[in-house]
Amino acid sequence: MQRQTPSSLAPLNPGLLDHDASHIPCALVVDDDPVLRLAVTQFIKRLGFQVTSIENGQLATQHFAAHGADIILLDAAMPVMDGFEACRSIRTLPGGDRVPIIMITIYEDEASIDRAFEAGASEYITKPILWAVLRNRTYHLVQSARAEQRLRNDWAFFQSMVDSISDPTVVIDREGLVRWVNAASAACLLMAEPVVGDALKFDPATELISSTNQYPVAESIRELLPTVRSQLAYSDEPLRLMIHRCAPDGKESYAELQGRALRGDDSIAYGFILRFHDVTEREIEQQRLHTEVTRIAKLAHSDPLTGLANRLLFEQRLREALFASATHNLRLALIFIDLDGFKEINDSLGHAAGDEVLKTISTRLVKRVRDGDTVGRFGGDEFAVLLTEIRQNASVEVLGRRLLSTIVMPIQVAGGTCRVSASIGISLYPEHGNTGRVLMERADQAMYLVKGNGKNNIRFA
């Protein structure tokens, strides 16, 4: 083995090595030639390294396993364990996959060079050593290893930062490929489990409900991500969407999808961060409250027995109809109905039978009028019908006769079959008044005139 020293080299520049005050870089020099080992050791020390020199590959492997190193300069031809086997062994140790290894050898043949790189060598330098080459390659490899370590640290830092977000969070690039995903995302049912490097996909059962932003978004969940990427790329306004998923078992999930562009120094959007904030409990509770409010409102405006409009709702509809009629020069009719013989049914067959009669009559009245008309129950056996946009008085009278005929039809109740008739009074707008109070009074008066003159008839005010 040829011996040589670096004595003829120009002064070294330790500043080329990016020093870390908290860590002096460590080098491991491995060579069975004590003179060359000493020369390399001194040379590497002058570059700013702490150096450990070892005479064979086996001891070098053991030392690295116990202490590690920032770079290894390894002779190829050594007893006990040669450099090729030592390189291969070190690469299997913790940290050994990242440490730079320079193979220094007298072998110049192609097979030896291939063998060195197959074993895991980072560089290959032949003897006699060109010290300037060794210096530059040592600097380059250590600085590259440090840059890679900083990159890994940055990656780990960003990953830990994303994992600290309690909401499922995904970072995608401009092509929609997943670049980061936090731990909480595995439990998010609204998207297929995101995998780094794959395209982000929503669960097929997911649907877009609404957007809280002013600009439009895709109507289809399949088109959502491309639309989100294109919009966020040119806007600094965060995107907020409401998405929903109904599982096959009926279980529902809701989330607010919040998106923002991730920009570089050139302001170009290189990626997008998407956060899925679960609002399932809030949405389900809001739906429950809405249902309850609707139910209570319906109870407040409807007759509990028949489901018809109660007096409060009927009078409100009458006021609205009068306003529309006055505005558009329309006519309307108000029909008051009082059942004849209902008290006798209650007394003879009981209140349950009476309730069945009232419900049956209610159904018959609703079927006889138009969808836009209103049928109401004022209590007891009193009903009212509001007809809007009427053209002729004769059509109102025809309807009144039809109501009479349908009311007197037999009714099946628990105690058998029964019949009732009705006394009907009608008032018209504008002929009989221009306020709801007056029209109701005139219809009521007409109804009582029928009742006092034989019943089972109709009469206009």
Image (spheres, helix red, strand yellow):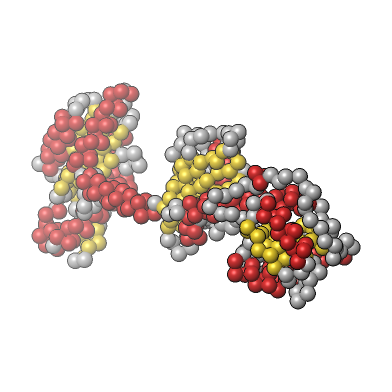
* Residue 50 location (% of width, % of height): 63, 58
Q: Residue at x 17, y 34 (%)?
A: 440
Q: Residue at x 70, y 59 (%)?
A: 41
Seen in the image, is 282 located left or right of residue 126?
A: left
The part of the image, by quadrant, that contains residue 156 is bottom right
Task: Report the number of numbered marks.
Answer: 0
Seen in the image, is 104 located left or right of residue 323?
A: right
* Residue 407 location (% of width, % of height): 24, 50
> Foreground: 436 or 367?
436
Instruction: Assign the N terminus to one quadrant of the image.
Output: bottom right
Give the vertical position of 75 relative to 144 (above or below). below
Q: Residue at x 30, y 33 (%)?
A: 388
Q: Residue at x 48, y 40 (%)?
A: 239
* Residue 278 location (% of width, % of height): 41, 53
Instruction: Assign the C terminus to one quadrant of the image.
Output: top left
The part of the image, by quadrant, that contains residue 26 is bottom right
> Foreground: 205 or 91?
91
Q: Is residue 236 visible?
A: yes
Q: Is residue 88 visible?
A: no
Q: Furthest residue to the right?
A: 109
Q: Furthest residue to the bottom?
A: 80
> Foreground: 422 or 8?
8
* Residue 45 location (% of width, % of height): 67, 55
